[in-house]
Amino acid sequence: MSNLAPPRAYRESAVLSAQPEQLIVMLYDGARRFLGQAAIAMGDGQVELAHRKLRRTEDILLHLREVLDMEQGGEIATRLQSIYLFCQSYLLKARLDRDPAKIDKVSAMLGELRDAWATIEQQR
């Protein structure tokens, strides 16, 4: 058994037993982790690694958009959708400009959303 097996098993168990709000927080955490890695890679000139990390973040943003309940979520869901779309377009600009600062800006925005969801999770 590898040394990586226990953390992976723990993560899988945490995901399977998590409440919806916890899952959202985990997704934001993952996106921000990938953004941090992408910014470092981009700053170091590792374009392919930066691209892969940005792609992982974009996949998370797409998933977050897809799970929005636009009927029940009303204005909040609409605003979240707009934020996610903005983040995706801004990451494209970061990629084209090779600008890690743009990646950091998206990470900060997602950090604010993450904190809001964490507060909701704690209140349940």
Image: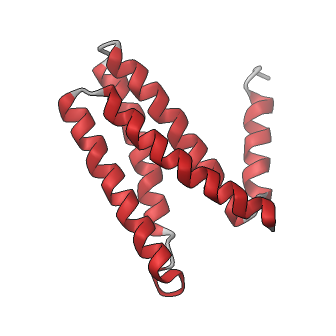
Residue 82 higher or lower than 110, as above or below = below
**Measuring 45% from the left and 66% from the top, which residue is drawn there?**
80
Q: Give the side of residue 8 with respect to residue 87, left or right.
A: right
Residue 38 higher or lower than 118, as above or below = above
Q: Residue furthest left?
A: 96
User: Residue 123: horizontal and vertical position, in percent?
Assistant: 79, 65
Front one among 8 and 95: 95
User: Residue 6: horizontal and vertical position, in percent?
Assistant: 81, 31
Query: Which quarter of the figure is the C terminus placed in?
Result: bottom right
Q: Give the side of residue 14 with respect to residue 109, left or right.
A: right
Q: Residue furthest bottom?
A: 71
User: Residue 16: horizontal and vertical position, in percent?
Assistant: 75, 56
Q: Give the side of residue 80 with respect to residue 21, left or right.
A: left
Front one among 33 and 83: 83
**Measuring 33% from the left and 59% from the top, which residue is drawn there?**
85
User: Residue 42: horizontal and vertical position, in percent?
Assistant: 33, 21
**Measuring 78% from the left and 49% from the top, which residue is drawn there?**
14
**Measuring 52% from the left and 39% from the top, which residue is drawn there?**
32
Identify the image quadrant of residue 45. Answer: top left
Q: Give the side of residue 6 with respect to residue 109, left or right.
A: right
Residue 102 higher or lower than 42, as above or below = below
